[in-house]
Amino acid sequence: MRADLAVIGAGPAGLAATLAAAAQGVRVTLIDSAAEAGGQFYRRPAAALRARRPQALHHQWRTWERLRDGLGTHVESGPVRHLTDHHVWLVERRSTGFTVHALLGPEQRDPAEVRADAVLLATGGYEKVLPFPGWTLPGVIAAGGAQAMLKGGLAVSGRTAVVAGTGPLLLPVAAGLAAAGVEVAALVDSADPLAFVRRSRALVAEPGKVVEGAGYAGRLLRHRVRTLARHTVVEAHGTERLEAVTVAALDRDGRVRPGSGRRIPCDTLAVGHGMLPHTDLAETLGCRLDGLTVHVDDEQRTDVPGVWAAGETTGIGGSALSLAEGHIAGRSAAARLHGTEPDPRAWAAAAKARTRLRAFFAALDTVYAPPAHWTELVTDDTVVCRCEEVTGGTIRAAVAELGARDARTVKLLTRAGMGWCQGRVCGPAVAGLAGCAFTPSRRPFARPVPLGVLARAGEADGD
Amino acid sequence: MRNPLDLAGARPGPAFTVTLDGREIEALPGQTVAAALWAAGVTSWRTTRGEGRPRGIFCGIGVCFDCLVTVNDRPNQRACLVPLHSGDAIRTQEGTGHES
């Protein structure tokens, strides 16, 4: 079956786009890697766990119910097809329309192809984690990973956790772990969230966010979680698994204050330093990127005809912004697929929300930042590239002794970024150690593809 | 003590048995390999190719490939993505997983 519009990603942006386009009579195929819609934000326990109170792990549950019911209605009545367990590895531009190439199921061995006249990329983002000694020990996990395991698997990895790094994600992660019975020994942020509260202008425009933040703060107080602002984890300790972390205070310049270290016993460290957008599919299509994000116009169109983008892939800004962008993208795509000029008045409310939320997250970005001198924490024997086990010392030698000035040269000299994850995890760290800006590395495929699948891809096509 | 299953009001079907390196552990319907191993108190199930260091879950969403594990003799499965079924045999993956 050929779709008018292929939406890739069933998180908030992709769902909002699907509903908006389908409401305008567009046949949508919604393609997503998970077994159920919702994305990372609305990740819910697997159906077989039969959770009666999944909302205990979420906020904005009513928004989810609206999205879920809307999707259900459109799937039942026909205009929307929802393909679950489809891991998209390439979107190919053809002479007429697009072919979306995916691998099926968690095994990702067998292929599936979807043809569409237009494509809407709502591929979301993933977490940035910067290295420090001990960060490869079992028990050290990405903050978002801890949350995914809790929301999806109703699983926690231990009894005592430290939540650390920087960014707004740390609050719900700490609150979620505490509510699930984990003792959260400390919430460690290299930024000072109070500094943000003092910048009242951004907050006055976002009363909902103030309530949300206050809600988490209240829950953390109730669970007696101690917050250490302007602190950082300098080392994770253990031999076969995590046993403790050392945290230390940061001075005004973002350097560790000598003598301020203290050891906190824990079996889990949930750590994150912000979010990165998934842009592989857009890059392969030839879409223009602004830095790390996909460039879009006011209608959420990329600069490639027939390709729209919405949500975190166009800039990290959370679920409410993703919903607004997805709605606009869906309306725009529907109008243009019908051969008409869209009327922006049709999405005026979403456009207003988009403007407001982009300003809010731009302000947030000025507050939440990793320690300015985080590279000083990376010792020469700290593993930086987790896949290929390349250390800080090896990368520094490539820079200082072999003259590498960019991440690509470092990769060619050291293998950092050449492994399974293709530099998604170590990319920002390698760039930091090489002293260059982190830029997306061009990858022809968005995930590993079996050679047999690659050899047969597109065979069924006539054009 | 409070646990995540209670928090979400989960009433899963009966637990079933899988094996980890031949040892029986219990898993719940719907759990991924990673979730079941965590619930059994296991946090690492792979050793690296170079230094032979233990690894378990890291990103939790299929991006980082740190949680690779051998399931039913197929190596390099992402434990955070693969759901378990009764009787599945999980093996700690050493190196590339193709050597043993």
Image (spheres, helix red, strand yellow):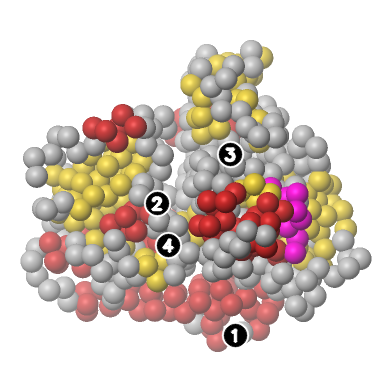
A240 vs A212, left or right, is: right
Q: Identity of the amino acid at label 4?
A: Glu
The residue identified by callout 1 is: A200
- Pointer 1 or 4: first along the chain: 1
Task: Give the quarter of the image for residue A338.
Answer: bottom left
For disc 2, the neighbor class at 10 Å (few under 14, some 14 to 19, many from 20) is: few
At horizontal 56% and vertical 47% (from top left) the residue drawn is A415
Distance from disc 2 to disc 3, alpha carbons, whole Å, reads 20 Å
For disc 4, the neighbor class at 10 Å (few under 14, some 14 to 19, many from 20) is: many
Task: Based on the picture, tell me whether residue A381 belongs to the magenta stretch.
Answer: yes
Instruction: Specify the subunit that label 4 lies on.
Output: A
**Helix, strand or loop under label 1:** helix
The residue identified by callout 3 is: B66
Instruction: Specify the subunit that label 1 lies on.
Output: A
Residue A403 in percent (x, y) is at 61, 63
Tell us which disc is closer to us: 2 or 4.
Answer: 2
**Above or below: residue A113 compared with residue A224:** above
The residue identified by callout 4 is: A312
The residue identified by callout 2 is: A443
Compare residues A207 and B23 and report the one nearer the observer: B23
Co-location on one chain, circles 1 and 4: yes
Distance from disc 1 to disc 3, alpha carbons, whole Å, reads 41 Å
- Provide the residue span drawn in magenta: A376-383
Q: Identity of the amino acid at label 1?
A: Ser
Distance from disc 1 to disc 4, alpha carbons, whole Å, reads 25 Å
Co-location on one chain, circles 2 and 4: yes
For disc 1, the neighbor class at 10 Å (few under 14, some 14 to 19, many from 20) is: few
Distance from disc 2 to disc 4, alpha carbons, whole Å, reads 19 Å
Tell us which disc is closer to us: 1 or 2.
Answer: 2
**Helix, strand or loop under label 4:** helix
